[in-house]
C-alpha cells in the first residue's frame, strides 16, 4: 500500500534501463539501489514486461527505474514486448543503454537513435567488465560520442561513477519541477482549497494534486483551509481577513467564482499543474482552438494515468458534454489513457491534456512538443473548462507571467 509520505511517480525521475536480453539490466538495477529489487537469472528473457521500481538513488533522489524486456526478444510475444519497451522509452526522462557482451549491434544502434530522436539523455553502461573484453566496444562508443561508463554489477566497479553521470545528465530546466505555487503564495498567507466530494473522489482520501498543493502551501510557511464548494461562503465569513488565494477544482470553478468578490485571486488545481508540469501560455493559446471546432472534428482527451472512470468522469464525460454544448457542434472524442501518449495526432483538431500529476515534467513537455510538431493545438482540462465557462481570465489573474496575457 502506498503512503502519503512517498514521492509520487509524477515527481520521480524516470530512468529506462534498456538493452538486449541477458545484458544485465536487472542486475544493474539491483546494484544501483543496493539490494535485490529485480529478479535476476542467467536465462535470457527473464524480464518479460516493463516493471517500474520506485527508489531513492543517492545523489539523484527519488527515481522510477523501469526494467524493460530485451529488445532482441525472439519469442512469440517478442514484438509486443519490444513495442512496450519502445513505449517506455518515449515516456522516460533518460535512458541507461546496457551492453553485457562487449559488442554493439543494430539493437543498441536503434535504441540510441530512438533516444536521440526523442531528445532523451542516455548513458551507455558497458557491463560485465569483470568477465568480458570491453576495449573494442569502448572504442566504438567513444567514436559515437556517447556518454558511457564501465561497470561490473558483481564487484561494484564503476557504480559510483555511474551515479555521478546520472546526476550530471539531469537537465535542471526540464527534469526539475518548478515550485508548484512559486510566485503565488508567500509565508503567512491563507489559501482556501475548494475540494468537491463527488463520485470520482477516492473513498476516504483526496486526490494527488490536492495533496501536493497542501504540502506546497505548508512548505511555503502558509496556511491551507480545505472546504467544499457548499461551505465556501460560510467558512470565508469566519475569517478575520480575506484569503490571499482560492484554488478550486475545475469542475466547480464557475460556482466558486460566483461566490468570490473580484478582489480575491482565484485559480484551479488543473491550471497550477499546467504551469508546474508544462507551458502555461501555450496551453492557454491552445484553448482558443475550441472556437474553431466544427461538426465531425476529432478531439483527443489525453489521460496520463489509467484509472477506473466513473459515470461523471471529468475527461470522458464532463468535458465532452461541455464542449459539445459550448460549440454547438457534433464532435468526436477519443481517449488516450496511460503514461504513453498517442503516437498519431494528425487526425485530431484539438488535444485536451489532463493535469499530469502522475507523469514527470519532461514527459508532460514531450507531449506538448509532439503536439506542436504535428501542428495540433493542445490545452489542459482546467484551462479548457475555465475558457468555456468564461472565467479563464479570472483564473489566470494570480499568475505574474500571465497578467498581460488576456484571453479575450
Image (cartoon, grey):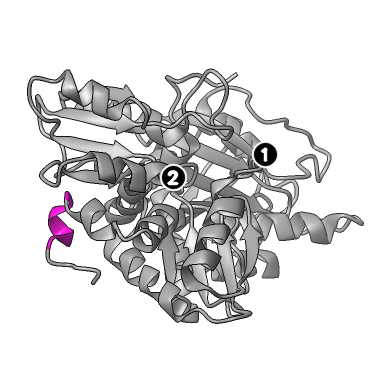
User: CA–CA distance between discs 2 and 1?
Assistant: 18 Å
The picture places residue 197, in percent across and down from the top left corner, at 48, 28
Nearer-the-camera pick, 57 or 392: 392
208 lies left or right of 231: right
Q: Toward which corner of the image does residue 341 lie, by quadrant? A: bottom right
The picture places residue 232, in percent across and down from the top left corner, at 29, 28
The picture places residue 154, in percent across and down from the top left corner, at 61, 31
Dot 1 corresponds to which residue? 308
Residue 321 lies in the magenta stretch: no
Q: Does any portion of residue 153 appear in the rendered image?
A: no
Which residue range is magenta in the image?
398-403
Quadrant the C terminus occupies? bottom left
The picture places residue 150, in percent across and down from the top left corner, at 50, 47
Per the image, label 1 sits on a secondary structure element best described as: loop
Q: Which residue is drawn at 21% across and 40% down?
A: 260
Nearer-the-camera pick, 321 or 94: 321
Residue 120 is tagged as none
Q: Which residue is drawn at 75% across and 41% down?
A: 47
Per the image, label 2 sits on a secondary structure element best described as: helix
Dot 2 corresponds to which residue? 251
Q: Of tags 2 and 1, which is closer to the observer?
A: 2
38 lies left or right of 34: right
Seen as rendered, the residue at the extreme right is 76
Amino acid at each position: 500500500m502506498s503512503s502519503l509520505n512517498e514521492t509520487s511517480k509524477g515527481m520521480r525521475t524516470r530512468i529506462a534501463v534498456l538493452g538486449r536480453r541477458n545484458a544485465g539490466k536487472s542486475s544493474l538495477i539491483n546494484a544501483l539501489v543496493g539490494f535485490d529489487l529485480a529478479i535476476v537469472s542467467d536465462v535470457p528473457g527473464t524480464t518479460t514486461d516493463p516493471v517500474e521500481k520506485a527508489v531513492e538513488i543517492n545523489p539523484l533522489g527519488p527515481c522510477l527505474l523501469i526494467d524493460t524486456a530485451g529488445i532482441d526478444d525472439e519469442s512469440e510475444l517478442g514484438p509486443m514486448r519490444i513495442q512496450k519497451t519502445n513505449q517506455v522509452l518515449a515516456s522516460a526522462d533518460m535512458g541507461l543503454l546496457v551492453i553485457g557482451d562487449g559488442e554493439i549491434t543494430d539493437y543498441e544502434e536503434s535504441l540510441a537513435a530512438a533516444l536521440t530522436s526523442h531528445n532523451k539523455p542516455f548513458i551507455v553502461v558497458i557491463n560485465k567488465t569483470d568477465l568480458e573484453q570491453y576495449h573494442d566496444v569502448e572504442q566504438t562508443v567513444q567514436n559515437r560520442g556517447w556518454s558511457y561508463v564501465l561497470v561490473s554489477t558483481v564487484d561494484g566497479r564503476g557504480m559510483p561513477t555511474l551515479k555521478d553521470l546520472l546526476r550530471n545528465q539531469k537537465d535542471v530546466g526540464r527534469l526539475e519541477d518548478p515550485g508548484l505555487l512559486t510566485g503565488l503564495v508567500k509565508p503567512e498567507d491563507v489559501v482556501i482549497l475548494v475540494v468537491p466530494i463527488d463520485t470520482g473522489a477516492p473513498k476516504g482520501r483526496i486526490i494527488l494534486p490536492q495533496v501536493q498543493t497542501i504540502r506546497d502551501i505548508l512548505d511555503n510557511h502558509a496556511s491551507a483551509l480545505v472546504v467544499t464548494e457548499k461551505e465556501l461562503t460560510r467558512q470565508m465569513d469566519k475569517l478575520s481577513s480575506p484569503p490571499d488565494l482560492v484554488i478550486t477544482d475545475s469542475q466547480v470553478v464557475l460556482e466558486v467564482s460566483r461566490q468570490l468578490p473580484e478582489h480575491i485571486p482565484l485559480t484551479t488545481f488543473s491550471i497550477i499543474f499546467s504551469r508546474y508540469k508544462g507551458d502555461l501560455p501555450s496551453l492557454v493559446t491552445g484553448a482558443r482552438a475550441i472556437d474553431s471546432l466544427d461538426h465531425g472534428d476529432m478531439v483527443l482527451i489525453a489521460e496520463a494515468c489509467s484509472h477506473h472512470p466513473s459515470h461523471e468522469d471529468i475527461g470522458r464525460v464532463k468535458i465532452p458534454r461541455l464542449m459539445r454544448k459550448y460549440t454547438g457542434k457534433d464532435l468526436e472524442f477519443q481517449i488516450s489513457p496511460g503514461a504513453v501518449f498517442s503516437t498519431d495526432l494528425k487526425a485530431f483538431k484539438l488535444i485536451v491534456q489532463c493535469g499530469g500529476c502522475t507523469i514527470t515534467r519532461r514527459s508532460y513537455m514531450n507531449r506538448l512538443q509532439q503536439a506542436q510538431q504535428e501542428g495540433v493545438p493542445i490545452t489542459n482540462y482546467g484551462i479548457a473548462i475555465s475558457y468555456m465557462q468564461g472565467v479563464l481570465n479570472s483564473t489566470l489573474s494570480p499568475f505574474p507571467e500571465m497578467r498581460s496575457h488576456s484571453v479575450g
